[in-house]
Image (cartoon, helix red, strand yellow):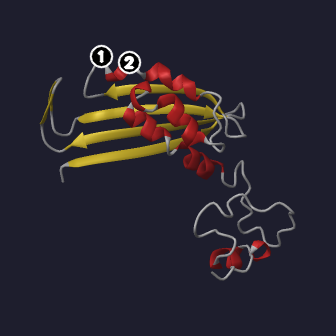
Amino acid sequence: MRHTRAIQVDAYARDDGLWDLDARITDVKTRDIALASGLREGGDPVHDLKLRITINRELVIVDAEAASDAVPYPGYCDTIAPAYKSLIGLSLTNHFRLRLKDRLSGVLGCTHLTELSLILPTAAIQAYANDVIKTRDGDGADESTVRPFQLDRCYALRVDGPAVAKYYPRWHVKPVPS
C-alpha cells in the first residue's frame, strides 16, 4: 500500500433543533515524500481537512466552517477556509452540487474541501432518515397519502422495481416494456 484517503462524516442533533455535519478528509502516504514545501514523512497526513455545516430541518445550510490542519502548501492552502461560508443558504436537496460548483470550484475554493462537500447531501439524508425524515420502513400498513421520500432516489428503490414491490407494494407501479 502507498496511499490512504479516508472520508468520514459524523452527524449531531443539536438541542436547538439544528444539526451539525462534521466532515473530514485525510490523505496519508505510507512513505516519505518530497513536496515543494518540504519533506512529508510517511504516516503524516498530506491533507487533513475538516468541514462543518449546520443545517436546519429543511436541509438548508445555516452555518459553515472549514479548517485545514495538514496541507501540502502551508500558509497558502490553509487560507481558503472563509470561502466556505458561501455555503450558507444553500439547500442540500435543491441543486446543491450545481450551486456548489458556481461558488467554490477551481480557484474559488480548495479542490479537496469542495470534493468533500459533494457527499454532504446524501450524508444528511442518511442522518435524517427515521429521525427527521420518516422513511416509514417497517411501519406495517402505510396509510399515508404521501409517497415515502426515498422512492425513486436510487436504482434499488425505483417505483417499478422489485424492492419497492416487496417493501412498499402500495407505491409499486408496473414496469413499462421497452
Q: Is residue 113 above or below residue 86?
A: below
* Lateral position of residue 143 relative to residue 75, left or right: right
Q: Residue at x 27, y 20 (%)?
A: 74
* Lateral position of residue 20 relative to residue 59, left or right: left
Task: Give percent across and percent down for residue 178.
Answer: 63, 81
Q: Residue at x 73, y 73 (%)?
A: 168
Q: Is residue 25 above or below residue 134?
A: above
Label 1, on which residue? 75
Q: Which mark is residue 37?
A: none
Identify which amino acid the numbered label 2 is placed on: Thr
Of 154 and 103, nearer the camera is 103
**Neighbour class for label 1 at 10 Å: few (<14), some, many (≥20)?**
few
Which residue is outermost to the front? 178
Of 90 and 48, nearer the camera is 90
Task: Give percent across and percent down for residue 81.
Answer: 44, 22
Identify which amino acid the numbered label 1 is placed on: Gly
Mark 1 vs mark 2, CA separation in Å:
7 Å
Task: Give percent across and percent down for residue 32.
Answer: 12, 37
Q: Which mark is residue 79?
A: 2
* Lateral position of residue 37 relative to residue 76, left or right: left
Q: Residue at x 58, y 45 (%)?
A: 121
Answer with the quarter of the image where residue 124 lies: top right
**Neighbour class for label 2 at 10 Å: few (<14), some, many (≥20)?**
some
Quadrant location of the N terminus in the rendered image? bottom left
Task: Give percent across and percent down for residue 42.
Answer: 16, 39
Q: Is residue 174 above or below residue 86?
A: below
Q: Residue at x 86, y 63 (%)?
A: 144
Of 66 and 15, nearer the camera is 66
Of 39 and 15, nearer the camera is 39
